[in-house]
Structure formats: structure tokens, C-alpha cells
Amino acid sequence: MTYDTDVLVVGSGPAGGSAALLLATYGVRTLLVSKYGWVANTPRAHITNQRTLEVLRDLGVEQEALAAGTPQELMGDTVLCTALAGEEIGRIRTWGTGPASLSEYATASPCGMIDLPQTYLEPILVSNAAARGAKVRFDTEFLSLEQDSEGVTARLFDRVRGDEYTVRARYLIGADGGRSLVAEQAGLPFAGQSGKAGSMNIVFKADLSQYVAHRPSVLYWVMRPGAHLGGIGMGLVRMVRPWHEWLLTWGYDISQPPPEVDDAEATRIVHDLIGDPSIPVEITSTSLWTVNHSYATEYSAGRVFCAGDAVHRHPPSNGLGSNTSVQDAYNLAWKLAMVLRGEAGPGLLDTYSAERAPVGKQVVDRANLSRDQFGPIFEALGIAGGTDDEGIVAGLAACRAPEGVKRRQALDEAIQLKNYEFNAHGVELNQRYASAAVLDDGGPAEEWARAPELYHQPSTRPGAKLPHAWLVNERGERVSTLDLVGGGRFTLVTGLAGGAWEPAARDAGVGFVRIGAEEARDAYGEWGRVSGMAEEECLLVRPDGYIAWRGPKLADGHTEELRRALSLVLQR
């Protein structure tokens, strides 16, 4: 049977772009199509967390991302105010920039966080995918699919020529966004609710440095009359590029007809949230969108897989959208590559849905809960039912009066609750996978020392991500444990006393890393502390950095144990 490509990827966003880049890097024939003429034209998703940067690091494009992004130190103090030129309600140290959390973030990963809008991330993904061999066709609209036991036939429309044609692929990835036609035609089941609230985005240019440069941040949350209605909880002025390019988000009543937002109305809204009508404003674009609480309970049907917003649809709270999308692709791509090369059985592909669907549900639930957690701030100020300018001023005055002790305490507690949105380190890094691609070692259930959504907890249990620890190579340079795995292959990781595992790794055809050897010295003792393992034990680490199997101390027959574990994981 003739195939035009091995994998057809529909959509060039964070999920589709990273899927194409990963597959091309792994040597898989890949075709990416997008109905648009180029990548994202508005900077919607932007927070880029440590796990996503770890993926980009493995792909060799981390430095491009760092060069294009706003650094972590400028992501800083999220401000709650009545307007940028108005009164401050409070500040929250966010995105791991506070003194306490900064050390936790630095300990957890070789990567920090950056603010990298889609308009900068997507060209990095797509251009590198093309450079590595992926075929990319813009102005190409997906119309329909038919699949059988051997592959998928997709009907496409060339928007330049104006004609239809078909592409035959072994597998198809639908990364076509929140209104995914691929997910619909594949019949993926969804749970939750769509259309919870209405929001508008206004992208604009204005020099706001006089109001923000002294308190650098990505997000300035604005309490104006009507801020509690619809939208994402409050008005938002979001930095796109410091301090002259911005995206404003405001809500509208979804039970009413959508508002018409022309440049004059957009400028009025911008000036209202800035609080200074004298600031020159250039409106770049406006758009309307809806807040959803919706997720697919299965991510695949036959030879069709979906990723990104196609399967998890939620507000931008917590900054999880593009991150989860990239990580969907990171989970799926190596599995497709190994099945296509005949190194794994097709049953391996079933583990994609088993592993990522629970993550998607967690992210959707968390983002919507964060949206709802603005309510206590309104309640503490005594304006939960919505009010006008005078009511907001009166609420703040009552909160700051000498006798307003209880109100101040309530406001402080309400603001601290937002740590679950802005410093959710555990939500970003604590995902645990349970599937046939993870071999449970029969140990007791994991106990969480601290709140698992707020704090990262490293683990060498099967199903956890390999912990980061700084090592020193033979040239005296620092390298992360994460730098020694990945690259599209399995790796066996052991200690200095575990050298006898090397023949087993060679026999099984996997990479081999001995921490403590000259090329990976545990100079700081970090690996010894974080791993909790005896040197003779080993970890079988998947291409996505997750631990598939934890091997015992050396014993007769350990070579066969490793081969058996690998065969089970790969469904061979």
C-alpha cells in the first residue's frame, strides 16, 4: 500500500508544531497542514513553564526560545489594582519569582520559566520541523477523514489553488484547536461544559512604562465596574513585550448577543483599564472567545490521535494551555516513531490516552477553579455582587481603615489563594503516569509531603519524571541528569556501582548512563539525595524522560529482566 506520509498533523499551533518537530527529529515522514497562511497572528498563550522548556531543551531549540522570550525576572509581581494608574489592591509574587519559590524552581529543573507568546513560539517549532525534514503546507484546510485498519485518508482543500485532494497517512494527529473538526469526526467523547462565559481580547500597542516598569510583571489584574461578570474573573492587562505591546482581556455577558468591538470601543476599554485616557493607543486586533470547562475522556480513536486544545478546553488561568499541548506531543511522538519503525507493538499507542487524558482533566479543572477563585477578593472588599466606581473605592477604604482588621485579613487570605494559579509548581511538574508503558514496582502509594498542586515533589518511582540533579562531566562542566536521557531513545540510568548493568543495556539496545562515572560525577551529591536509590539499582527512562521501570540491585538474570521490562513497556 502506498502512503503519502507516515503521520499527517493537522494544525500548526503549540501541539501540532511540536508534534511535527518531534516526529521530524525522530526521522518520521511527517506532513503538517494548516488552513491559515502562517502561524498564530495573536499572542494568545504565553506562559512557558519549566517542563516545556525541558522539552525544547531535548529538541535543541531551548536557546532560540530563551532569546525570543521575556526572562523570568520580568514576569514578577502580579498586580491587583483598580487601574494601572489607579490604586493597588495587592501584589502576588508569581511564576516562581518570589524568594522562597525561586529556589524551589531552580532546584527542580535545569530550565527556568519564560514568557513566550504563541507568535514567537510557533515559528520556532514549525521552522525547525521543516528544517529537519517535515513537509509543511499552509493555506491547506482539513475537510474530513476516513480510516481503516491500515491507515487514514484525509480530504484536504488547497485554499490557494481552490481545489480538493486526498492524503493517505499511516496515522493522523488532530491539533486543530478548541473547535477541532478532527476530534469531532473521530468521535472522541467529551465531558464538562462549553460556553461558560464570554471574553474579549484586545491586542494593542502603548508605552505604559511609567505605570509598570517599577513593578515588572506579565499580568496586571484590574478591578473595574463589571469585572466580576463573565470573562476570566477580572479585567486583565497582559504584557506581550515589555513595556509597549499588550493584550487586554475583558468579559461580557454570554447570555446576551456578542458585543461589537470596533477600534473606538476597544480604545475606550483600554483607556478605562489603564486609567489614563491621555495615553496614545494603537489597536492591533480584537477577538471574542468563550470560557470552556471541557475535556476529552479519550484522546484517540483507531489511527487518529488528538492533542492540545482539541482535547482540553479551558480558560488561560495558570498558564497551562500551550504547555500541556507541547507535552501531549512529547508523550505521543516517540510512541508513534517506535511503532512505525517496528520497535514497538501498536498497543503502545493506547498508553497515550491513558497517560495524557487524566492530565488534561486536571488542567481543565484547575484552570476553571483558578478563574472562580477571584470571588473571595470581591467578597473581602464587600463588592461580591458587583458595583460601580464609588462602591469599589468605598470597599477599599473600608478595608484600609484602622478598624478594618478582619477585612484586611480576609483580603490577604483571598490574595494568597491565588498562589494556586500563579505558583502551581506541582501542577506544572508533578504529573504521574499510570499505563501499560509504566511497570509498577509494587511499592506503597506515594505520600505527598506538601500540597501536590503547589509544590514539586521529585521521585524515581515508575510513572514519575526523572528528577533533575546537577552533575559534572569530564570537562568540569555542569550537566543535568535530564541532559543524559531523551533524544528519542530509552536510557538505562544507574550508579557508579551499577556498571554490570552496561552489558544488559547494550544487549537491550538502550542508552546507558552511570552516574558517578567520570562523564557524570555527582559532584554536589544532589543525585544521591534526590534519587533515594542504591547505586546498584537502575532506572529505565523513556524518551520523554519518564521512568518506565525501576530495576533491583544486581542479581543473576538481570540482563533478561531488563529485556523483559522493555518488551512489556513497548508491547512487543
Image (cartoon, grey):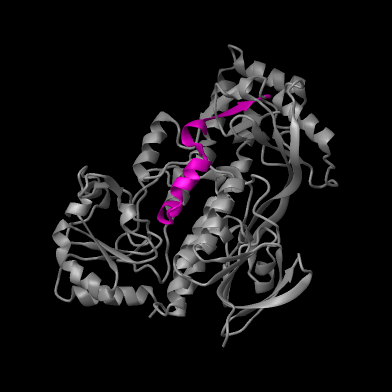
Residue 516 visible in the snapshot? no
Quadrant housing the N terminus: bottom right
The structure residue drawn at horizontal position 47% and vertical position 42%, both measured from the top left corner, is 66
Q: Quadrant of the C terminus?
A: bottom left
* Figure check: 536 above or below 2: above
Residue 59 is situated, as x and y percent measured from the top left of the image, at 44, 56
Picture quadrant of residue 276: top right
Horizontal and vertical percent position of residue 30: 55, 70
Query: Most extreme residue toward the top, as rendered?
Result: 402
Q: Which residues are magenta?
A: 55-83
Q: Is residue 111 above or below residue 361?
A: above
* Residue 4 higher or lower than 460, as above or below: below
In the image, 225 versus 331, the foreground residue is 331
State left or right for residue 508 relative to residue 313.
left
The image quarter containing residue 301 is: bottom right
Q: Nearer the viewer, residue 58 or 392?
A: 58
Which picture quadrant has residue 499? bottom left
**x and y percent of residue 327 in the render?**
49, 57
Count of numbered circles on the image: 0
**Residue 508 left/right relative to 499:** right
- Residue 553 in sight from this viewpoint: yes
Q: Position of residue 95 (x, y in %)?
A: 49, 37
Q: Is residue 504 above or below residue 315?
A: below
Query: Residue shown at 68%/26% (left/top)?
Result: 382
In magenta segment, residue 264: no
